[in-house]
Image (cartoon, rainbow, N blue to C red):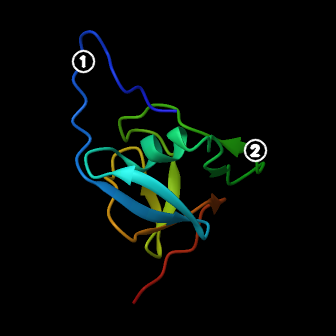
Amino acid sequence: MRIENHPILNFERGEKVTFFYNGKEIEGYTNETIVDALHAAGIRKLGTSPELHRPRGLFCAIGNCSSCFMTVDGQANMRVCVIKCREGMKVEEQHGRGVVRYD
């Protein structure tokens, strides 16, 4: 669910884009972060913790913690609370520390 109107805030979402989360199409906007779009789509679990494999969700929303680490376009450990949505990007839930690729 997205807030469409607010008496004080003005939402400039940008253009609508479609990206893929674990193979599923998700709609987002160019001026919102990946986690904003996932949250609007009802997705709250972003991955699991490295040690005890507990579910992780949004925590700080400013890029300081590791709760929102996900794999974005094949790159592990990306903080999706600060990355803007782009057309066609591939976002995957990350379990534990993630796998870093060296291409």
Mark closer to the observer (2, 1): 1
Q: Which mark is residue 9?
A: 1
* Residue at the image point whose x is 76% and y is 51% from the top: 53
Q: Is residue 21 left or right of residue 7?
A: right
- Label 2 crowd (10 A; few <14 / some 14-19 / many >=20): few
Q: Which mark is residue 54?
A: 2
Q: Nearer the viewer, residue 47 or 38?
A: 38
Residue 62 quadrant? top left
Q: Nearer the viewer, residue 52 or 3?
A: 3
Q: Nearer the viewer, residue 1 or 43?
A: 1
Residue 16 quadrant? bottom left
Identify which amino acid the numbered label 2 is placed on: Arg
Considering the numbered disc 2 on the image, is that residue within a helix, a strand or a loop? loop
Q: State the count of labels.
A: 2
| Residue 97: image location, x then y, percent | 60, 62
Confirm or deny contact between disc 2 and disc 1 (CB under 8 A).
no
| Residue 103: image location, x then y, percent | 39, 90
Q: Check the image and name the residue furthest to the bottom.
A: 103
| 2 or 1: tag closer to the N-terminus | 1
* Residue at the image point whose x is 33% and y is 21% from the top: 5
Vertical order, 60 against 75 (above or below): above
Vertical order, 80 against 101 (above or below): above
Identify which amino acid the numbered label 1 is placed on: Leu
| Residue 37: image location, x then y, percent | 45, 46
Considering the numbered disc 1 on the image, is that residue within a helix, a strand or a loop? loop
Q: CA distance from mark 2 to mark 1?
A: 35 Å
* Residue at the image point whose x is 34% and y is 46% from the top: 82
